[in-house]
Image: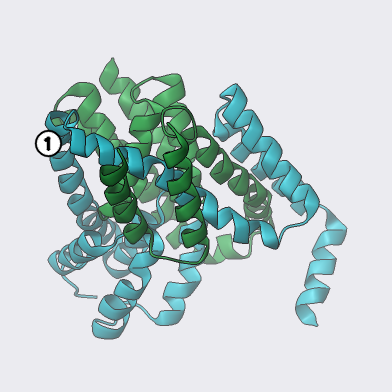
């Protein structure tokens, strides 16, 4: 049963994962934290942090990680990872095959432009969901947040920021 | 096309292992390896189809791998490219997941994660500033409303993706919009 749930959840994440990694965190949070309780908000933030420092998309990293922690074995990991890849594989092959028809299709373009403001909303909700008592424990958290926010707006490398904030955590706590 | 599946697989394995920080980071690697060095596809083909890879659901890195693999060697090529790009992150995260359960209560590790959590929130929130700059007020209001409902009520974001797509499709059926669009295109 847990394997079926894992498969279906990650299939959904793959199928509705529009707009890149940060928008997908909102979807992942809803499936993994709200609906199934596989991870806490703080644990998902940890997976996101690990994901910044390791290669590969967050959706894959999260599938591999949650698949392992929920079932306790490699097969759970593999199943969730396959599930999250399936929609990409099939939809992208179809889209490549019918590229010219898709490119000139007004309904397709309409759907894309209609989803665009929603993506901003999804990214914002991703940030809000990971923001809470478990991730912002005291004033030091706010200092790290403010510093990283300003640095990130000024295009400082995100991997560097994550490493610096880890060092700051070790020094401060 | 006689590109071997092994070449496709190993090229994407390299890209999968060295692409830090999201799908866009792999673009220069693909340009160097697959367009300039091997000539699997033209630069124009790549950039045109990249917009589709961004519109289709799923991680952009996966979608890009699938389309380059498919263009080069069909369905088998798509599988080879997908496997190549996924295996490095799968192996690394699996290692971390197995080791992490043992180090989770280590005080240094706990402290490091306490520092990284607010940083992750900042990294997600920061791009919103530049995204919101080019938008009109009702789009911003819509985005704020969607975020509030998803966050506070725990409603699945899937409903908002659906709603946006449906509204966009309905809008595209307006006949006057089509002619306007064409006139603009001719100008």
Instruction: Please give left or right for residue B160 compared with residue B173 in the image.
Output: left
Q: Check disc 1 and report its element: helix, strand or loop.
A: helix
Q: What chain does mark 1 sit on?
A: B
In which quadrant of the rendered view does residue B136 lie? bottom right
Say if A162 sits above or below A97 in the image: above
Place of residue B36 in the rendered image (x, y in percent of width and height, measured from the top left): 30, 85
The residue that appears at 12% across and 30% down in the rendered structure is: B102
Residue occupied by mark 1:
B99
Q: Nearer the viewer, residue A10 or B136?
A: B136
B151 in relation to A37, above or below: below
The residue positioned 36% from the left and 57% from the top of the image is A161
Q: Who's green, chain-wise?
A: A
Which chain's colour is cyan? B
Q: Quadrant of residue A32?
A: top left
Above or below, B61 against A126 in this view is below
Residue B167 in picture, x, y percent from top left: 73, 43
Q: Residue furthest right?
A: B176
Judge whether B172 appears above or below B26 on screen.
above
Q: Nearer the viewer, residue B79 or A25?
A: A25
Which quadrant of the figure contains the C terminus of chain A?
A: top left
What is the basis of the colouring in this image? by chain
Q: Position of residue B79 (x, y in %)?
A: 25, 54
């Amino acid at each position: 049963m847990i394997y079926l749930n894992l498969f279906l959840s990650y299939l959904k994440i793959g199928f509705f994962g529009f707009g890149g990694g940060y928008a997908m965190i909102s979807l992942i949070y809803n499936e993994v934290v709200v609906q199934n309780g596989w991870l806490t908000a703080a644990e998902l933030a940890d997976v996101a942090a690990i994901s910044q420092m390791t290669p590969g998309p967050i959706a894959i990293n999260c599938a591999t990680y949650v698949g392992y922690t929920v079932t306790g074995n490699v097969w759970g990991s593999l199943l969730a990872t396959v599930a999250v890849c399936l929609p990409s594989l099939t939809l992208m092959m179809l889209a490549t095959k019918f590229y010219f028809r898709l490119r000139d299709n007004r309904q397709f373009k309409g759907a894309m432009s209609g989803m665009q403001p929603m993506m901003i909303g999804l990214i914002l909700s991703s940030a809000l969901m990971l923001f809470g008592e478990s991730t912002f424990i005291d004033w030091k958290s706010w200092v790290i947040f403010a510093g990283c926010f300003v640095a990130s707006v000024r295009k400082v490398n995100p991997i560097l920021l994550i490493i610096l904030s880890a060092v700051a955590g070790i020094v401060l706590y | 096309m006689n590109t071997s599946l092994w070449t496709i697989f190993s090229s994407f394995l390299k890209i999968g292992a060295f692409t830090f920080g999201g799908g866009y980071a792999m673009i220069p690697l693909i340009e160097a390896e697959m367009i300039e060095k091997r000539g699997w596809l033209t630069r124009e083909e790549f950039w045109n189809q990249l917009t589709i890879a961004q519109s289709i659901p799923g991680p952009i890195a996966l979608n890009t791998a699938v389309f380059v693999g498919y263009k080069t060697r069909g369905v088998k090529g798509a599988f080879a490219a997908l496997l190549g790009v996924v295996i490095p992150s799968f192996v690394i995260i699996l290692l971390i997941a197995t080791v992490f359960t043992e180090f989770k209560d280590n005080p240094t590790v706990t402290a490091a994660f306490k520092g990284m959590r607010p940083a992750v929130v900042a990294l997600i929130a920061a791009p919103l500033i530049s995204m919101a700059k080019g938008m009109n007020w009702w789009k911003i209001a819509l985005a704020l409303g969607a975020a509030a409902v998803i966050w506070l009520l725990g409603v699945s974001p899937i409903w908002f993706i659906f709603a946006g797509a449906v509204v966009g499709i309905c809008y595209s059926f307006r006949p006057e919009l089509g002619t306007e669009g064409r006139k603009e295109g001719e100008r």
